[in-house]
Amino acid sequence: MTELAGRLESLSMFFPFHNEEDNIIPVLEEALNAGSAVTDDLEVIAVDDGSTDRTSERAESVRIRFPETVRIISYEINRGYGAAVRFGLEASTHEWIFFSDGDRQFKLSDISRLIELTNSGRDKLLALGYRVNREDSFHRKMNASLFNAAMRLILGIRGVRDIDCAFKLIPREAMRAIPPLTSEGALISAELIARCSRAGFTLLETGVTHYPRLFGEQSGARFGVIARAFVEMFACLRSIRSG
């Protein structure tokens, strides 16, 4: 897939949201600006994971202004982060797929750093961000460190320093090359990386900007979320080993 330096032929950008009424409009507007700077063929998708606040209503206000570019996927029941990412991947129609979180903790114009990686000459490539200065609590960073170590050990992921960083650029061909993803929770990034690596895709990383969360509530450090991820991790390992 040949691209002009710094530009993509077409790009889907999607963002999972759950009760992010204070963040969704700025995120979608920033995505429109960042995406338009790197492609002439853009779609931006908001995946509303069963929000109970005004998230969908506010997403709709952006879609009305940009009906040819912005799409909304909304479902009533909170399925989990992994399910929202899977739905976003499945809904994306363009040749490159970018996703990030909807909590305004990333600088979306850093997508240009990922695009620089795609100009490496490799055909089968995932461009991954890692948080240079992770702006989370000590407790959350410690949990993430332990969880990443477990994923490397159990799933055999090598050469990726920030597995669950929600700043990834994926060629659509990668989704055609791997079995359907199954994770419903926090394991989704690890499953995606493990399956793409097994399918022969090169994993390249670059540093991206990370901000502290200003609005909304983080759920990734909750015990139930972590426990669910470990259950899914072993299920994923069995699935990968079985082919």
Image (spheres, rainbow, N blue to C red):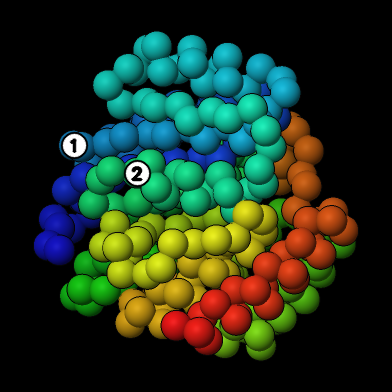
Numbered mark located on residue 211 in the image: none
Q: Nearer the viewer, residue 27 or 173?
A: 173
Q: Which residue is mark 1?
A: 40
Quarter-of-image position of residue 147: bottom right
> Would you say 9 lies left or right of 129 here?
left
Residue type pointed to by label 1: Asp
Residue type pointed to by label 2: Ser
Q: Nearer the viewer, residue 174 or 122?
A: 174
Numbered mark located on residue 92 in the image: 2
Tell whether label 2 touches label 1 (CB within 8 Å): no
Identify the element where label 2 is drawn: loop
At x 51% / y 40%, what residue is drawn? 15
Q: Nearer the viewer, residue 73 or 135?
A: 73
Residue 182 visible in this rendered orientation of the protein: yes
Measured as percent of width and height from the top left, residue 152 is found at 62, 83
- Label 2 packing within 10 angstroms: few (<14), some (14-19), many (20+): some
Measured as percent of width and height from the top left, residue 213 is found at 72, 41
Viewer-nearest of discs 1 and 2: 2
- Label 1 packing within 10 angstroms: few (<14), some (14-19), many (20+): few
Measured as percent of width and height from the top left, residue 37 is found at 28, 39
At x 66% / y 56%, what residue is drawn? 185
> Would you say 4 lies left or right of 74 here?
left
